[in-house]
Amino acid sequence: MNPALVQSMVLVFIASVIGSFGAVFLKLGAANLTGSLWSFLNWRLALGVALFLGSSAFYALGIKGGQLSVLYPMVSLGYIWTLVWSRIFFQESMTKQKFAGLGLILVGVFLVGLGS
Amino acid sequence: MSTSISTSIPQPDAAASRRKSILLVFSCTVLGAIAQILIKTGMTPAYFRPELIAILTNVPLMLGYTLYGVNTLMLVLALREGELSMLYPIIALTYVWVTLLSYTLLHEPPNLYKNLGILTIVIGVAVLGRGGKK
């Protein structure tokens, strides 16, 4: 693997981690929504959106240096982080099926990486 | 007697709204994939320069992100109504479209590892969705 591709993969990887935190704050912010427009102006939602924007910047810089058919599938790593944060921050249950899904996603990303 | 008959009447509304959310999520996967191709195009040397004005006037990049943003909102709305375990596998189709469009429009070389990897990810996301309670 050439260094440019490794750098691209690292950038997309970072984007997936930042994006998963964005989802956590959107979820926290959504819990505070009352239905009035003003309730949309809360710092959790704002931080969630900001994290998504930051994630997008890392992602764009990442896919700049490699094939989209290799780098886009890495976005699915975000599912893994989201599941971990859901467990830690929201005490959501970790079922066997979720574990199996995570394993398959990891194997899939690895296979796509081999195809680069 | 009459009450038992009336409760056994199938509800066309539920089936129709289910079809609607499936169709909406399916459309989202296609639009999401197109957004990815636009973003990737906007990041090629022909369009990308690391300056604020150049980035803001980068048509494919801005169009791609706008489409991505609108698409995400649509997806959130669709997911609020529909059954997640059924919609997750459909969402995972985005990976298939992005790969196919990368092969055809961006002329990236296809190979068995990429295809197997995408298939595995799609199954993984589907299994993940079924593991949820909602």
Image: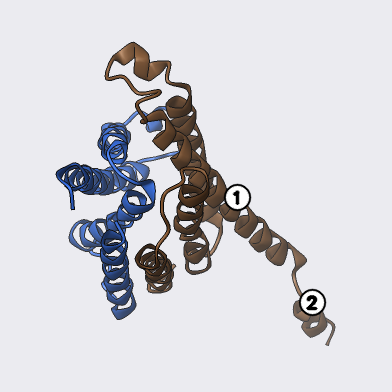
Chain colours: A blue, B brown
User: Horizontal placement of B20 versus A105: left or right?
Assistant: right
Q: Chain of mark 2?
A: B
- What count of labels does the image hold? 2
Image position of A85 (left or right of A30)? left
Residue B132's quadrant in the figure? bottom left
Question: Which residue is drawn at the image coordinates 18% and 46% (left, top)?
Answer: A10
Give the percent coordinates (x, y) of residue B129.
42, 68
Quadrant location, the N terminus of chain B? bottom right
Marks 1 & 2 on one chain: yes
The residue furthest bottom is B1
Considering every residue shown, the one lying at the far top of the view is: B53
Q: Give percent across and percent down for residue A34.
A: 42, 39
Dot 1: element:
helix
Mark closer to the observer (1, 2): 1
Can residue A71 be seen by looking at this rendering?
yes
In the picture, measured across the screen, residue B12 lies left or right of residue A64, that is right
Subunit ID for the residue under disc 1: B
Q: Amino acid under label 2?
A: Ile
- For mark 2, what is the residue? B9
- Towards the viewer: A45 or A35: A45
Residue found at x 25% / y 36%: A58
- Other-residue count near label 2 (Cα within 10 Å), few / some / many at <14 / 14–19 / ≥20: few
Q: Which residue is denoted by mark 1 in the rendering?
A: B27
State whether residue A94 is above or below residue B69.
Answer: below
Labels 1 and 2 touching (C-beta < 8 A): no
Q: Which quarter of the image is occupied by the C terminus of chain B?
A: bottom left
Residue A65 vs residue A9, the one in the foreground:
A65
Of the residues shown, which amino acid type is indicated by label 1?
Ser
Left or right: A94 in relation to A69 = left
**C-alpha separation, residue under disc 1 versus residue under disc 2:** 31 Å
Write the residue at 19% across / 45% down.
A14
